[in-house]
Amino acid sequence: MERSDVIIIGGGAVGLSCAYYLNQAGYNVTILDGGTADKKSSCSWGNSGMVVPSHIVPLAAPGVIKKGLKWLLDPESPFSIEFKPSLEMISWLWKFRRATNPNHVKAGAKVFRELGFTSRSLYLELGQEMDFGLESRGILMLCNSEKVLEEEFAISAMARELGMEGVDLDQRGVKAIETGMDTAILGGVHYPMDCNINPVLFLDVMQKYLRAGGVKIQYNTMIHGFQTNNGEIESVETKQGKWKANQFVLSAGSVAGKLAGIIGLKMPMMAGKGYSVTMESPVKKPALPAILIEARIASTPMGPNWRFGGTMTVTDSDRKINIRKLKAMLKSVQDYYPEYDLSWTEGLDPWVGLRPLSADGLPYIGPFKEYPNLIAATGHAMQGISLSPVTGKLVRDIISKKETGFDMDMLSPDRF
Ligand SMILES: Cc1cc2nc3c(=O)[nH]c(=O)nc-3n(C[C@H](O)[C@H](O)[C@H](O)COP(=O)(O)OP(=O)(O)OC[C@H]3O[C@@H](n4cnc5c(N)ncnc54)[C@H](O)[C@@H]3O)c2cc1C
């Protein structure tokens, strides 16, 4: 049986980032991933690639439930719940609802701010070492209704209070910086510190870098069990046999909660299904990445290409594509960029990804009390790309028994 210092369960953006920082610190690291080497089924592959320290409001925020219930009745809405009345989902929804209060948002905003700032700096450092399409041109929040624009201005005021740059813009202000395409909006906010990467490049470049540095990465290796002894994980079980290590990192994305459940650990998680469509070298594309707020769509010009990402369906694990929702998503882009023509996305293959959703919108990062050599690194929901580097660094600090400098209680996988 092989033995490593650290086994990482799941090699998406989070798992690879953990491997990077652990490898730098001299640990002998093995990544075991149940998916195929193209990594297309991981949520880290086809996402919008935004690195957003400006996103300080957790998913579980006041108004989300109300909006969600309203949207439930609309088959074309960007948000929905695939309600199969399992105990697991009811219990997750209950916890999620409890977290949607102003105190939690305030406390969560501070955590996201610290994590987001650190992760952005780490991306800038990593970008010196590897090319994964990092672009630091900021991100626009675009609004086409007065009420939503006011809400975005309120969020930008809160972000500025927390030290984040955020520029409120009227229609003319947006047009002055969005020079690639015409926009049909009322206004927006520009967050100049936000960046974007090409996530596919990130996965590929990181994987090559790690392998060259001695990290073993094994695909098609699904973990289905754990061997425990005296409050420690001894090995993980796969079809190909058992793998031993001193420490284990659980970064298996949306199924991490279920894996933890095998040994009786309670880390409530659901999957947040989303789609993306990528146009290769369209005739026109915007100059800046943007979030089209009312439509809940992320629009990212990525090198010569242009990607739309969106929709959030809370589900257990279903990957079926809802064509009606997808079409509605692609159509609503026109409300923001009138020059975009629906025919540009006709016939393109949509990608589907499952975001790992914690029950209060904050990630799970830290050791489990019951098995201290099992460290959770998951639950980042819509920010798994943004927060991959900082998560990797925190996991390295935890394993090396170093002070992290963060309030780890709020991130503990045992907090429910
Ligand atoms: C449409 C869309 C747009 C998005 N846009 C952004 C964005 O702009 N910015 C941002 O920050 N985030 C974004 N996200 C969210 C982001 O993609 C996720 O938070 C992130 O990819 C999660 O990374 P991960 O490594 O935790 O999980 P994953 O990437 O899903 O990786 C988990 C890995 O674990 C493996 N695995 C699963 N089970 C097992 C097992 N039993 N044994 C071994 N291996 C296993 C899987 O094969 C997979 O490779 C978006 C998501 C979607 C769907």
Image: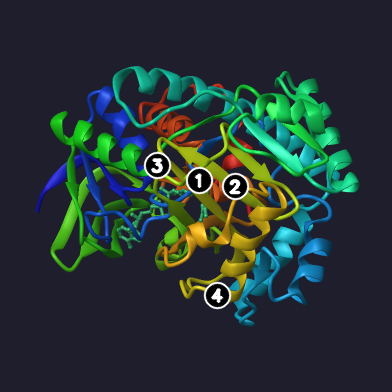
Compared to 350, does 390 lie above or below?
above
Which badge, 3 or 1, is on the more N-terminal residue? 1
Name which quarter of the figure residue 19 lies in.
top left
Tag 2 secondary structure = strand
Q: Residues within 10 Å of mark 1 (few under 14, many from 20)?
A: many
Q: CA distance from mark 3 to mark 1?
A: 8 Å
Depth check, front residue: 183 or 408: 183
Residue drawn at (67%, 59%) of the image: 332
Which disc, if any, is residue 311?
none
Tell me if 293 is positioned left or right of 392 in this view: right
Name which quarter of the figure residue 313 lies in.
bottom right
Q: Name the mark nearer the viewer: 3 or 2.
A: 2
Confirm if mark 1 falls within 8 A of ligand 1. yes
Tag 1 secondary structure = loop
- Please name the residue that numbered disc 3 is placed on: 199
- Looking at the rendered image, the quarter that the C terminus falls into is bottom right
Residue 203 at x, y percent in the picture: 31, 42
Which badge, 2 or 1, is on the more N-terminal residue? 1
**Which amino acid does the dot numbered 1 rest on?**
Ser
- Please name the residue that numbered disc 4 is placed on: 322
- Please name the residue that numbered disc 1 is placed on: 48
- Please name the residue that numbered disc 2 is placed on: 298
Which badge, 1 or 4, is on the more N-terminal residue? 1
Which badge, 3 or 2, is on the more N-terminal residue? 3
Q: CA distance from mark 1 to mark 4?
A: 19 Å
Confirm if mark 3 falls within 8 A of ligand 1. yes
Tag 3 secondary structure = helix
